[in-house]
Image (spheres, rainbow, N blue to C red):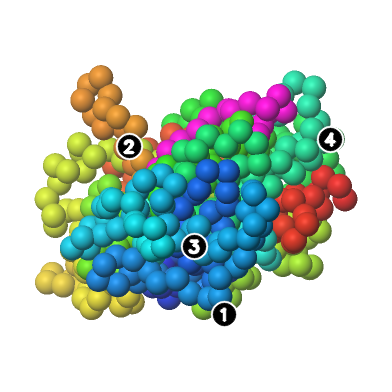
Amino acid sequence: MADQSTPEAPAPGADSTGTADSAGAPGSGGSPGSAGASGSARASGSARASGSARAPGSTSSERTAPSASATGASSPKGAPLEEASPSGGAFSRRRLLGTAGATGLALGAVGGAAGYAAAPSAGTTTPLSSVGADQVMFHGKHQPGITTALQARGHLVTFDLAAGAGRKEAAGLLRRWSETARRLMAGEVSAQDDTDVARDAGPSSLTVTFGFGYSFFARTGLEKQRPDALDPLPDFSSDHLDKARSNGDLWVQIGANDALVAFHALRAIQKDAGSAARVRWQMNGFNRSPGATAQPMTARNLMGQIDGTRNPKPTDTDFDQRIFVPASGSGDPAWMANGSYAVVRRIRMLLDDWETLSLKDQEDIIGRKKSTGAPLTGGSETTEPDLEKTGSGGRLIIPINAHARITRPDQNGGAAMLRRPFSFHDGIDTDGVPDAGLLFVCWQADPLRGFVPVQRKLDRGDALSKYIRHEASGLYAVPGGAAEGEYVGQRLLEG
């Protein structure tokens, strides 16, 4: 989890070129930041007015890292968009989104810390902070939530189709889910029975991503369309898997930079399932909040390690080849074009054991300096480690079983994956041990050329394995993004 030579997404607040290794998870090199290359935009400021859209204002081709002024607020950009009001008159969408007058609160900042201020006087507007204003596009070549920057809050949830539900019901469900995701990601309210949980917030970089599990295809009579790459993962000696919290017909990943926005989306998705599907398992995660550090940097995991350093970047010439299924020539079914395969693992960190180790022992296990993420052989976080360098007595400076050494692509036949995890903490066990660790999510064009070879290598001798435990697992086929007017998975379910 500390080091990984796999494609990576920039950390919250980092630009798409930032990289970092991760400690503990397969192929990790630091904490996955996030490649904000998936088309995103910034709303010009947004507050969820009752019954109205939190729609974005102007857009940009890249995700904008938080760049608020000293007051913590971003200035509205672009020409106002006019829209009919419920009474028939016209009003400025920007003006609506730029104030929170309807709720009596406006988001502001004092001394760099976000806070609440009294409602603005009539005729004034207070734009959202840059965190709330950031928006990610639902429609596109790839689904959102893959190369999107790491978000502060995440939910992973799987559903099993209800008894008697099949292809028709699945199509209706994906149609409802896609429309809900599109609306909420645009800062709009749900189409039906909105709970108002996110009423005062902007889009906050919300993403909703959908995938299909192995069992989905038999349930819908689509076995002939099931990709070979979706075959069950092999068993690993370090697995202690809970079947009740593994796999599932349908997988949904939700991420946002605001906890209420993320929960609002989770609740809407659950309600949309109706009688077509029931929740199988659900997990909650978090990352460092954007703007929490003085400058953008790779995130840390719960072991205190910089996590995601060697993640692949969208600027790499072979990034798409490694992470996404090509439109043709891959052997995958046509409906998977521009899609990806997500491996999900709940990895518990044995923190009580880890924290008894000396700093030197922790750094030897990872192969990197805990403070900076730099390899033990010197340099900075992004310096290539010298795996042959020896110290006094001729001993390797980076131990032979160090996590950073074992997870390098050149030590695994070039295997690479884009790690994009969340940390989790689910309370304290009765014996006083924290139930905490990593919700590991990685993306690749083929799990047999990404996750599997790296995890096999880790299984055979990673020094970190003694301090982590894989407790749940899933593999999902995530189709390409939906075009305008389409829903996710339409080419499979109606093809």
Residue marked by disc 1: 317
Q: Residue 168 carries which label?
A: 4
Task: Please report whichever mark, 2 or 3, sits nearer to the chain's N-terminal start.
Answer: 3
* Residue stretch rendered in magenta on the structure: 272-286
Residue marked by disc 2: 425
Q: What residue type is labelled 4?
A: Lys
Pick whichever, 484 or 168, lies toward us.
Answer: 484
Q: How far apart are marks 4 and 2 (CA)?
A: 38 Å
Mark 4 surroundings: few (<14), some (14-19) or many (≥20) residues within 10 A? few
Q: What residue type is labelled 2?
A: His
Image-based side of 444 in relation to 258, left or right: right
Observer able to see residue 188: yes
Residue marked by disc 3: 95
Asked whether the residues under the numbered discs 3 and 1 touch, taking CB atoms below 8 Å apart as contact, a structural biologist would say no
Mark 3 surroundings: few (<14), some (14-19) or many (≥20) residues within 10 A? many
Asked whether the residues under the numbered discs 1 and 2 touch, taking CB atoms below 8 Å apart as contact, a structural biologist would say no
Q: What residue type is labelled 3?
A: Arg
Task: Please report whichever mark, 3 or 1, sits nearer to the chain's N-terminal start.
Answer: 3
Q: Which mark is residue 240?
A: none
Q: Distance between the residues labelled 3 and 4?
A: 42 Å
Rendered view: 430 above or below 110: above
Q: Which amino acid does label 1 sit on?
A: Thr
Q: Distance between the residues labelled 2 and 3?
A: 39 Å
Q: How far apart are marks 1 and 2 (CA)?
A: 37 Å
Residue 297 lies in what quarter of the image?
bottom left
- Percent coordinates x, y for residue 135 in the rendering: 51, 61
Residue drawn at x 22%, y 74% is 377
Task: Please report whichever mark, 3 or 4, sits nearer to the chain's N-terminal start.
Answer: 3
